[in-house]
Image (cartoon, helix red, strand yellow):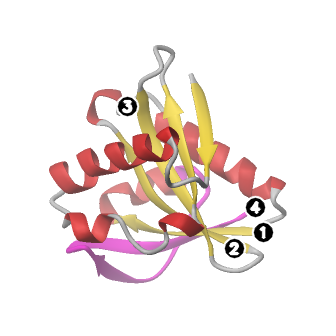
């Protein structure tokens, strides 16, 4: 298993990330395709976890909010690979990257169904429940 990182929206890594996101968010969850790809793609750092047989299985992106804070977004694991700790692994890699870049905090908007997952990884919920793409979310953050 390996995790590759890119900022190049023309790279195969980025295209693998988009394919995972399309399957999970657009096909499974019904998020409109025009909301899934946004104006922040080129400003984000994209991570893709590949299985031992080189298949893309999970993705996440980090969007810098300022010089101290990343926003973790678009975290998705393909259905066939869920329950294998891949989400935690790719987030750990993203957190390591953020620390190496001298960032101090990661924020995210978690779907309510994923709140406990993020809590296990040390994220703390705050604020009111909000809707994003018609799905209930909660704000969460973690100091690095």
Indicate which disc residue 69 carries. 2
Q: Residue at x 82, y 53 (%)?
A: 100
Label 1 Cα neighbours within 10 Å, binned few <14 / some 14-19 / many ≥20: some
Q: Are marks 2 and 1 in contact (CB under 8 Å)?
A: yes
Query: Mark 2 and mark 3 in contact (Cβ < 8 Å)?
Result: no
- Judging by the rendered image, the residue that carries numbered circle 4 is 144
Question: Do the residues under discs 2 and 4 have CB atoms within 8 angstroms?
Answer: no
Identify the magenta region: 120-144
Q: Secondary structure at mark 4?
A: loop
The disc placed on residue 83 is 3
Q: Which mark is residue 52?
A: none
- Above or below — where is 122 with respect to 84? below
Q: Quadrant of residue 103?
A: bottom right
Crowding at dot 2, Cα within 10 Å, few <14 / some 14-19 / many 20+, comes out as: many
- Residue at 61% x, 56% y: name it: 122
Is label 2 or label 4 in front? 2
Q: Is residue 27 left or right of residue 119?
A: left
Q: Residue at x 49, y 72 (%)?
A: 40
Q: CA distance from mark 2 to mark 1?
A: 6 Å
Q: Residue furthest bottom?
A: 128
Q: Earlier in the sequence, mark 3 or mark 2?
A: 2
Magenta segment main secondary structure: strand
Between marks 3 and 2, how big is the CA–CA gap? 29 Å
Disc 3 vs disc 1: which is toward the camera? 1
Say which residue label 1 marks: 104
Q: Is residue 130 left or right of residue 135?
A: right
């Amino acid at each position: 298993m390996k995790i590759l990182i890119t900022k190049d929206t023309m790279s195969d890594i980025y295209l693998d990330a988009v394919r995972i996101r399309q399957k999970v968010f657009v096909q499974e969850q019904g998020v409109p395709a025009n909301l899934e790809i946004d104006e922040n793609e080129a400003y984000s750092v994209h991570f893709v976890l590949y299985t031992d047989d080189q298949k893309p299985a999970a993705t996440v992106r980090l969007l810098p909010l300022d010089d101290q804070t990343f926003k973790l977004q678009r975290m998705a694991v393909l259905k066939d690979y869920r329950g294998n700790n891949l989400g935690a692994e790719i987030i750990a890699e993203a957190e390591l990257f953020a620390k190496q870049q001298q960032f101090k905090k990661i924020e995210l908007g978690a779907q309510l169904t994923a709140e406990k997952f993020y809590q296990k990884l040390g994220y703390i919920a705050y604020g009111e429940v909000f809707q994003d793409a018609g799905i209930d979310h909660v704000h969460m953050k973690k100091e690095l």
